[in-house]
Amino acid sequence: MTRVVYLTGGTGYVGAPLLFRLLSRGHKVKALARPGSERKLPPACEIVTGDALSAYTFVASVPFRSTFVHMVGTPHPAPWKGRQFRAVDLVALRASVKAAITAGVEHFVYVSVAHPAPMMKSYIEVRMECEAEIARAGLIATIVRPWYVLGPGHWWPVALKPVYSLMESVPSTREGARRLGLVTLDQMADAMLWAVENPAESTRVLDVPEIRRVSERVGLP
């Protein structure tokens, strides 16, 4: 079934391949872009110029009963970027939630992060606040919780795969190793596409094992 999708963060690391997949499957996509960044989006989508941090600049462009995919966030998250997480990630999420409620969207898809985890505490705290904002708003949502997404420029954790294998073989560390496991950019984009094409009836969470599992169902050529 063709869906109407409103996408923020469509030029990002995961957003760009997701946008390509959505268009290739025939979905109608409206993508939000900052002034001056419109050329970074493919002409096959409908480009909306606005500020992701300010709902009033784009709320009128969100279609009624559409699927809203929110992917705006601080690039290359790092422990020292705590202020940016609150100033960008949290503010942008609140703006998208406000716009989604006003427009009466049918399904809200949000990329969070796996938690709990022993590191990146400020990042995880903000993402958990964002999840709580979605819940308080009463939106039906799919919350996607990767830990690290392997892809161009993001390959260094491949060296940790033997450590993950060892931890998954030990009962006391198995659950944590799976929850904080690695996924590829293709798996992540495919799982996001699956979430769009299979709207949740009530809020659900796709953790790392689930991201891997549902990505196999997409059936891209």
Image (spheres, rainbow, N blue to C red):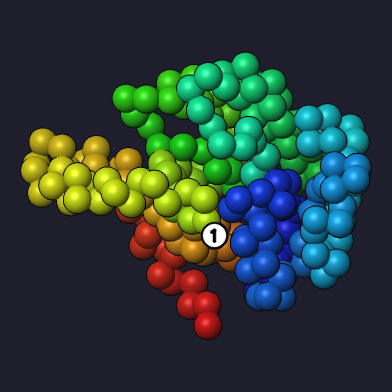
* Above or below, comparing residue 109 to residue 16 in the picture: above
Look at 85% across and 67% down and name the residue there.
43
Please say if 66 is above or below 174. Answer: below
In depth, the one of 72 and 60 nearer the eye is: 72
SS of the residue under disc 1? helix
Residue at image mark 1: 189
The answer to whether residue 141 of the structure is visible from this angle is no
Give the residue at the far bottom of this rendering: 221
Q: Position of residue 207 (x, y in %)?
A: 39, 46
Q: Where does the image place residue 119, in percent across and percent down from the top left? A: 37, 25
Q: Position of residue 96 (x, y in %)?
A: 73, 37
User: For residue 177, what is the image quadrant?
Assistant: top left
Q: Is residue 151 visible?
A: yes
Q: Is residue 11 left or right of residue 174?
A: right
Give the answer, above or below, for where 94 lies relative to 159. Answer: above
- Image quadrant containing the N terminus: bottom right
In the image, what residue occupies the spot 43% across and 57% down? Answer: 184
- What kind of residue is marked 1? Ala
Residue 221 rendering spot, x and y as whole percentages: 53, 83
Residue drawn at x 67%, y 39% as measured from the top left = 72
Q: Which residue is drawn at the image coordinates 90% and 45% (left, top)?
A: 36
The residue furthest top is 83
Q: How many marks?
A: 1
- Pick the front one: 131 or 188: 188
Mark 1 Cα shell of 10 Å, populated few (<14), some (14-19), many (≥20) = many
Judging depth in this view, the residue of 100 and 188 nearest the camera is 188
